[in-house]
Amino acid sequence: MGGGSAVKQYQRRFLQGEPEETGRKEECEEAYWTAKTFGEYEVRETEGGEYELVKGGINVGVFSEACVEEKRILFSLSHGMLLEVSEEGVREIPTPEKAVFFGMIASDGSNAFYRHRTHEGGYRSDYSTRFFSENVELIDLFDELSEKIYGLTPHQYVRERNGLITAAIYSKGVFYDLSDFDIKTGAYEFSVPREHLDEEGKRAFLKGFFSGDGSASMTYKGELLIRFYSKCREGLEELRQILMDLDFHPYEIGEDRKLEGVVYRFSIPSREYERFIDEIGSFKPEHISVFEEYRRLRSEKRERS
Amino acid sequence: MIETCLVDKCIRGTSYTGITHPRSFCRLRQYCPIGGRDRPPPEQVLPSGRKQVAKVRFPRFVPEIDVADQRSWIWRDGFQTSAVFVPLWQLLTNEKILAQASSKGLHDYLDFDGGILLSTVMPDELIDRLETKDYFKLINDLKPDATMVPDNYTYTDVPLYQSWSQTIRLVSSANDFLKLDTPLIGLVKGANLRQMDWVLKKQVEMGYVSFAMPARELFEEERLDEFLPYILSTLRKSFRGEKDFEFLLYGVGQRLYSYKDISYSNLSWFLRAKHGEYYWDGLFYDLRDPSIRFEECYCEACRGMMPQDIIDLWFKDKEHAMRILAFHNLLDLSRLKRRRK
């Protein structure tokens, strides 16, 4: 299969192939030992803290950084990804920051490309990844994540009519990176890359999504209501699944008929609110203040009782 | 374009993660003048045989299928296609499918009466695992109508020793494959023009007349134009007329109208449909793209529908919409002429 540049092949297939300034080479270190074994996989380590992942004697990958945990080893890849090696095998998972980014795109984002015919009869392609919000804090968070994951600063546009801010990244690489995970499958459609999310990733994805298409409000009785909304029923079902993976017990999906069409929703039982706020929470300032209000009322109630 | 070798770059101070970095586990160590060892002995160029190899007769577009995803088996939905490419690597990575396909043969397994062409284009780690005898056993069990000669890997930025070794290996395998009774497809691969030229001429000498060029990477790196005109001109010079040989561009997900009389094969028609992408004049678009969204299409799949109709159908019956879109993409890639200038 291999053709063209080996560096590009590694970038495409293994999220590696990034240049490192290592200084002029005089000699190569060779001594290594087996650091850990997971089923068929063996992790070799050198004194200098470099790692090689081997399966059945065949090299799978080489890495300069690793995070060794009891039941797994995580190797850093590029664009906010990690390679997780455990007894279950090997998989690529996003860092918590990237999982938040995924969640934000799934809720209030888009990932699309358009072609324009040029006068010469050719075409030009515009790839764009956008996040829409009226909230400056969320836009700033999107910018920060984009810079951290891809090293790109998004452009920002403000719609004067309603104050909607758009943060846009124009990059073919980012478009294909997100397309590979099928985050945004169409307008108002999303899917959850469940097989690529570990527990921390699931929490981060939910937090990113909830900040966009989540609702936290106090009823007139002073009770909190936590809901997830979307026009995409399949995506919402996948969100319920990952909440269940985290041992939450979300209610079944219901629907609201509105002028612009059907909007699906589900909520969390009130007994799990505290856990939801602690483990998942939100980046949206309005949600955070509602959570604080909820906690204040709870502690007042506890004191009274 | 001349690229600097990664080993040379590493010695000068820039190494690349996963390849030459970390240095302790450098993948190109055997070619390195500093600390390099275990370099394999040079491949021997053996005298090649000759045989009258039958033409495969490629249609204009040969769809590649996904053996693990039956939605790409379009004949099951009543859509006609004369030949398909089956990627061998998908069988090798799925033991259950391989066992079934080996016991019945590909025709019975896929329930397909048309031509089945076996693609040997596969990831490097699988290439290294297979020997000629393994290919022979697989071909004997799977019973395809034609097969490519074994694939190799030839990168433009690794030491030439590696890419020449792989090139010689390809020629040697092509020579071994002459023993098979199955029609054969020669491969055009190389890290530079000299390697491609040599590999092509050797296969022409052996009697090969059908050629495929796996070119996905070169196309994506926008370097295909450095190679393709030369390859086509070499082929024309090697044969008496255009009709004496056939050439297929493999893995390029787009029609290149500047090159005449070549066939194409890819899985993009299906992969793009899964992502809601629509081919128009050999180029894929987002279904919502304003430049095609309201253009009616009168192909056998669309029958007057426009992309907006497919979007509407997508919300009602996603599977049905995807099947129409996939077959539309296949038909668009098979078109001989552009719809509009």
Image (cartoon, rainbow, N blue to C red):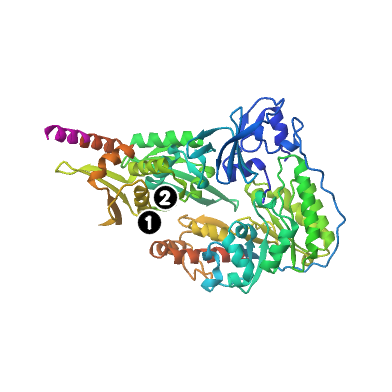
Q: Residue A13: image x %, image y %?
A: 59, 46
Q: In this view, does B321 lie to the left or right of A230?
A: right
Q: Does the magenta stretch include residue A114?
A: no
Q: Is residue A302 magenta?
A: yes
Q: Quadrant of residue A102?
A: top left
Name the residue beneath numbered marker 2.
A192
For disc 1, the neighbor class at 10 Å (few under 14, some 14 to 19, many from 20) is some
Structural distance between the alpha carbons of marks 1 and 2: 9 Å
Q: Are marks 1 and 2 in contact (CB under 8 Å)?
A: no
The answer to which of A21 and B44 lies nearer the viewer is: B44
Question: Which three-letter amino acid code belongs to the residue tagged 2?
Answer: Val
**SS majority, magenta:** helix
For disc 2, the neighbor class at 10 Å (few under 14, some 14 to 19, many from 20) is many
Q: In this view, does A55 lie to the left or right of A82?
A: right
Q: Is residue A253 left or right of residue A87?
A: left
Q: Residue B139: image x %, image y %?
A: 70, 65
The kind of secondary structure element at disc 1 is helix
**Number of numbered discs on residues:** 2
Chain-order first, disc 1 or disc 2: 2
Q: Which residue is drawn at 23% across and 42% down?
A: A217
Q: Residue A29: image x %, image y %?
A: 68, 29
The magenta-colored residue range is: A295-305
Provide the chain ID for the residue under circle 1.
Answer: A
Q: Quadrant of the C terminus of chain A?
A: top left
On residue A234, the disc is 1
Question: Which three-letter amino acid code belongs to the residue tagged 1?
Answer: Glu
The answer to which of A150 and A32 lies nearer the viewer is: A32
Provide the chain ID for the residue under circle 2.
Answer: A
Residue A248 in sight: yes
Q: Can you name the residue that lies furthest to the left here?
A: A304
Q: Residue B167: image x %, image y %?
A: 77, 50
